[in-house]
Amino acid sequence: MKQLKVITLIIISLSVLLAVGCSGSGSDNSDNNSGNSNNYGDNGSTPPPPPPDSPGGDNNNTDSLIADSNLEATIREALNKPTDPITEADLQSLEVLEAQQKGITDLGGLEHCTNLRNLNLAGNSISDIGVLAGHPTLFELNLNNNNISEIYALEALPDLHILHLADNSVSDISVLASLGNLWVLFLDNNDVSDISALSGLMQLQQIHLSGNSISDVSALSGHPVLGQIWLGDNAISDISPLAGISVGYLSLYANNISDISALASISNLQGLTLSGNNINDISALSGLNTLSSLWLSYNNISDISSLANLTNLRQLVLNDNGIIDIFPLIENGGLAQGDSITLYPNPLNETSISIHVPARFKCREMDTN
């Protein structure tokens, strides 16, 4: 019996020793595994921060914010910084950026150029101009010849004075009503039909709208003084809203105009282009004594007696009409040497060809052939 107790104690002692041994061995392994886990970040602990020069580090480099490599190259050139990291302060220092015809498609990154005054992006492949909404200091913006159809971002440009949007796909220009400081607007060759947004822009001095689908020009009737209005190649037939305006140059070529009586009350007109319409009566022009350039080609005009008193004319284009007698030009004492007169082709009578042209215009530039 005593022997049995001794054996039992020995077995219990060995068990305790084995348990202690296994416990010690497990603790060692746990420490090792914990060390390995910290090395690889598998235990949920926060890894150490990357060194300053690694991609995730804070090196104040905003190159990644400039989405388009061509735009980045242009900005580097403007900053004279070919290799060093571009900082946000660098971008904020830009006031002028000439980036025309650079193959740019994405303007991402320009939102950091918050002090831009003049931005030229003409001749690229840009469609989204959303980032420009954050540039309240922009004075002149050139977006000619891109792929732009929506211009809502321009609403937040209160200091914009000159805007170029020619040769795009813009149809809705309602946002322009908010640009009360606009002086010059280029919208040639777009898809615009409604220009009512321009009615309240009383600072406008030049409006370029040729090559659109405009028929109603009443939005221009309330403007006090306009330097230039370009409305050629549209769908205009009624120009009565233009009566009484003051404008220096008016272009209405290639429309459907036949009645030009509204032009009689326009003041300060120096240049007028009416080529390519359906005009036969030009009597409304007889009192426009300030005219120096007049284009009337490709119409149905036969009587030019109204031109006799326009003594300030220096350029007169009358080709492709039905003019027979040019005697009114003989009576116009203002036409002088160096003036340009184009008459060919017209069915001029023999008197005009044989007598009037040699006698009165022998020293002038006159194309009759």
Image (tube, rainbow, N blue to C red):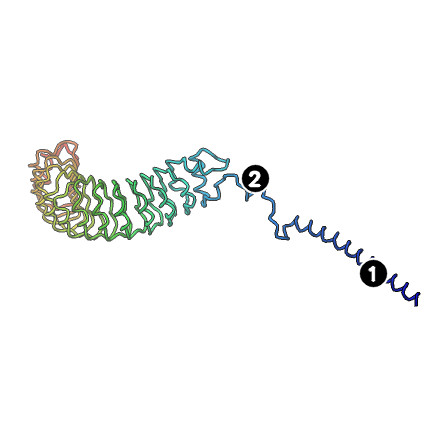
- Residue 368 can be seen, yes or no: no
Q: Quadrant of the N terminus?
A: bottom right
Q: Residue at (34%, 48%) from the top-left corner?
A: 153
Spot occupied by residue 286 in the image (x, y as percentages of width and height): 8, 41
Asked if residue 144 lies left or right of residue 37, the reply is: left
**Which kind of residue does numbered mark 2 sit on?**
Pro
Task: Tell which residue pokes out farthest to the front in this image.
Answer: 2
Task: Say which residue label 1 marks.
Answer: 15
Spot occupied by residue 160 in the image (x, y as percentages of width and height): 30, 41
Dot 2 crowding, Cα within 10 Å, few <14, some 14–19, many 20+: few
Dot 1 crowding, Cα within 10 Å, few <14, some 14–19, many 20+: few
**Which kind of residue does numbered mark 1 sit on?**
Ser
Asked if residue 109 lies left or right of residue 362, the reply is: right
Task: Say which residue label 2 marks.
Answer: 52
Corner quadrant of residue 294: top left
Q: Nearer the viewer, residue 284 or 59?
A: 59
Q: Nearer the viewer, residue 46 or 213?
A: 46
